[in-house]
């Protein structure tokens, strides 16, 4: 089991996100539990390329302060929605014989969706804790409606197990006992 923290960068963690307070609290709790349970925390960050605020060297590219990686945490950089395409993450996880991935981060309807579906297609058991992914309003759906659509309809029992925060933490604590 690993924890995958996707695109929790300073530019993206902002007041436009649906359920921002719970999102921040829940990810902090999940990261803390992972560390206590000796579950590897892996970060994936998005780079939109030079000339944007979401590129290496810019403040917005950095991981949000409350979620900062520790010195030995792996950080993979991507430039497409899926955390697996061209990042080395897939090979890393396969080499470590990982089977289960807890996915948290941003944005529900973009990179989280692509990462969950791609992970599923590569044979991973994808776990999505409640209120640990979020997104902003778009021209079709509010952030809340996007969150509910993906977490309650699209992913659950198709591509992932969408479970409560408490159940996720309980499973993580059991992992340490194994």
Image (cartoon, grey):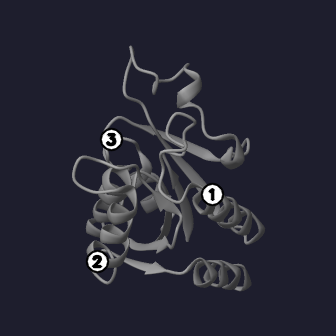
Mark 3 or mark 1: which is in front?
A: 1
Of callouts 3 and 2, which one flags the residue occurring earlier in the amino acid sequence?
3
Helix or strand or loop: what does disc 1 sit on? helix
The extreme right residue here reads 36
Above or below: residue 32 compared with residue 45 = below
Look at the image and tell me whether residue 55 can be seen: yes
Q: Which residue is mark 1?
A: 21
Above or below: residue 9 compared with residue 137 = above
Disc 3 and disc 1 in contact, CB within 8 angstroms:
no
- Give coordinates of residue 87: x percent, y percent: 39, 42
Foreground residue, 169 or 175? 169
**Residue shown at 70% from the left, 65% from the top:** 29
Q: Which residue is mark 3?
A: 86
**Residue shown at 48% from the left, 60% from the top:** 133
Q: Residues within 10 Å of mark 1 (few under 14, many from 20)?
A: few
Q: Residues within 10 Å of mark 3 (few under 14, many from 20)?
A: some
Quadrant of the image containing the N terminus: bottom right
Q: Residues within 10 Å of mark 2 (few under 14, many from 20)?
A: few
Residue 153's tag is: 2
- Give coordinates of residue 129: x percent, y percent: 52, 72
Of callouts 3 and 1, which one flags the residue occurring earlier in the amino acid sequence?
1
Of callouts 1 and 2, which one flags the residue occurring earlier in the amino acid sequence?
1
Foreground residue, 79 or 177? 79
């Amino acid at each position: 089991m690993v924890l995958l923290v996707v695109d929790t960068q300073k530019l993206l963690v902002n007041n436009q996100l649906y359920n921002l307070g719970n999102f921040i609290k829940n990810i902090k709790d999940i990261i803390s539990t992972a560390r206590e349970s000796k579950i590897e925390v892996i970060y994936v960050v998005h780079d939109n390329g030079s000339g944007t605020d979401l590129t290496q060297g810019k403040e917005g590219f950095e991981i949000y302060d409350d979620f900062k990686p520790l010195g030995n945490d792996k950080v993979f950089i991507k430039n497409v929605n899926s955390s697996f395409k061209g990042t080395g993450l897939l090979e890393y996880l396969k080499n470590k014989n990982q089977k289960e991935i807890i996915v948290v981060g941003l944005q529900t309807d973009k990179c989280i969706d692509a990462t969950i579906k791609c992970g599923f297609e590569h044979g991973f058991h994808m776990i999505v804790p409640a209120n640990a992914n979020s997104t902003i309003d778009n021209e079709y759906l509010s952030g809340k409606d996007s969150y509910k659509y993906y977490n309650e309809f699209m992913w659950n029992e198709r591509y992932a197990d969408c479970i409560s925060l408490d159940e996720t933490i309980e499973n993580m604590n059991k992992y340490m006992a194994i």
